[in-house]
Amino acid sequence: MKIEDIDTQQTQKQWNNTQCGTADYLDEIEPESVEWFDAVRRSRYEIIDDWIPRMIDFSIAKDGRLLEIGHGIGTDLLTFSKNGADVPGIDITEEHFRLTKKEF
């Protein structure tokens, strides 16, 4: 087995077990509910990565197409979509894909 394959498998295992943007702050919220996804979004844009809304123009792809590679649970993908972009995305893990689909 190549080292690249081992790295990929370890990365997939990590992100399938601990999804991007999730942490203990979600413990009191029903998993995968609207409130849960809203809390992830608030945490990302207002606390952890509060620079993102100032630095990224989410309307830049309005009426266009934007591919996000490594979309995590889809927080930014959904924000681009809400701002008028057609947003295909790819991710290395099945769990990120499943959660993104659920959030949409």
Image (cartoon, rainbow, N blue to C red):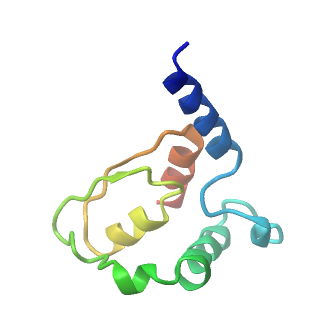
The single residue placed furthest to the front in the displayed view is 3
Q: Position of residue 45 (x, y in %)?
A: 52, 80
Looking at the image, residue 56 lies above or below residue 101: below
* 101 relative position to 87: left or right: right
Looking at the image, residue 72 lies above or below residue 63: above
* 87 relative position to 2: left or right: left
Looking at the image, residue 8 lies above or below residue 67: above
The single residue placed furthest to the left in the displayed view is 63
* 86 relative position to 56: left or right: left
Residue at x 34% of width, y 69% of height = 80
The single residue placed furthest to the right in the displayed view is 28
* 50 relative position to 26: left or right: left
The quarter of the image holding the N terminus is top right
Q: Position of residue 18 (x, y in %)?
A: 69, 50
Residue at x 51% of width, y 17% of height = 2
Residue 37 image-quadrant placement: bottom right
Pick whichever, 2 or 17, lies toward us. 2
Residue 90 image-quadrant placement: top left
Residue at x 51% of width, y 54% of height = 72
Q: Position of residue 34 (x, y in %)?
A: 62, 70
Residue at x 77% of width, y 72% of height = 25
Looking at the image, residue 2 lies above or below residue 49: above
Residue 62 image-quadrant placement: bottom left
Circle count: 0
